[in-house]
Amino acid sequence: MTAFLAACVVAGTPLVFATVGELITEKSGSLNLGVEGMMLMGAVMGFVAAYNTGNPMLAILCAALAGAGGALIFAIITVTLRANQTVTGLTLTIFGTGFASFVGQPKIGFSVPGTVSSFFVKAPIPLLENIPILGPIFFKQDVFVYFAYAVVIISCVYLYKTRLGLNMRAVGENAAAADASGINVTLYKYAHIIAGGALCGLGGAYLSLIRVPIWQSDVVTGRGWIAVALVIFASWNPVKALVGAVFFGGLSILGLRLQAMGFTISQYLVDMIPYLATVIIVIISSHKKKKENQPPADLGNNYFREER
């Protein structure tokens, strides 16, 4: 069971990055449904950089920049040009899918160099790895998983313990009031949309560099949409996002676990489980009435100062 739970953490790591990235974007009042596209852009650029240079840090940087680049496109169109956010996000997903197919086509079937794979081997944390039950599950992972933990912690501190985080949440709740109090709404929206896109790119990179270190065009396989749903499930809270990501990561590998135990189960049914669970979670979450479970009041609304 411990080995399975540790595998759930690994499977949920790309969802942690993507979910926290979308959470930050939505907290600033922007609804970016292009998570799938940004993850694909990060996955392909991270893989290409890793294959051509053999440098894991450069691969991670390229993945983050690719996701941030996709988010920048979204920001320009929705914040500056004030286009519909839902349509723009869906278009970004289509663009990211095409971008990944075009850039990754020559690399289909190629593997990540050994210098990159060896960098991401499991690295147990001394002392913490010896904690009963929790140690083997959470602290005998690779450095990318530990980075995901750090992202969650930093996000919590930033959102709830800093003035910048308070300003960002104010922009998401009421951009006009935030602007009237002297907060640069456009700057905050741009910064957090781009930061969220970078995290989505890192989520894609985890898939192409570690989870499936052989390039294939469908490496993300809908995880971006699960991340969007997880934001709702987590009530826009990074810690809950981590828990939800690990849970959905477990669902994605549950079929393999059952088959290993000798159960005969249709692969189509196995593939359907995470998405069916996503629909159920969204339905349940939509009935939460507590204020802390509600989305930012200005989510999805474009702000134009002259309309104040």
Image (spheres, rainbow, N blue to C red):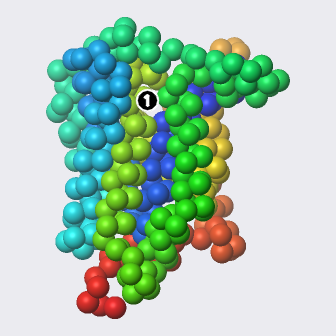
Q: Which amino acid, by three-letter code, is at mark 1? A: Tyr
Which residue position is annotated with label 1?
206
Picture quarter with the N terminus: top right
Q: Horizontally, is 272 left or right of 53 in the view?
A: right
Pinpoint residue 249: horizontal percent, then vertical percent.
Answer: 58, 35
Viewer-closest of 37 and 18: 18
Image spot of residue 267 (x, y percent): 53, 26
Residue furthest out toward the top = 114
Image vertical order of residue 69 relative to residue 272, above or below: below
Q: Position of residue 85 (x, y in %)?
A: 32, 67
Q: What is the quadrant of residue 182 in the picture?
A: bottom left
Question: Is residue 238 left or right of 96 when viewed as pictured?
Answer: right
Compared with 54, 135 (above or below) is below
* Residue 209 location (% of width, % of height): 39, 23
Judge the density around disc 1: few (<14), some (14-19), many (≥20) Cα neighbours within 10 Å: many
Specify whether residue 53 is in view.
yes
Q: Residue at x 19, y 25 (%)?
A: 105
Q: Nearer the viewer, residue 7 or 257?
A: 7
User: Residue sitting at 24 percent across and 24 percent down?
Assistant: 48
Hey, which residue is sitting farthest right in the picture? 132
The residue sitting at 19% across, 71% down in the picture is 81
Which image quadrant is residue 87 in?
A: bottom left
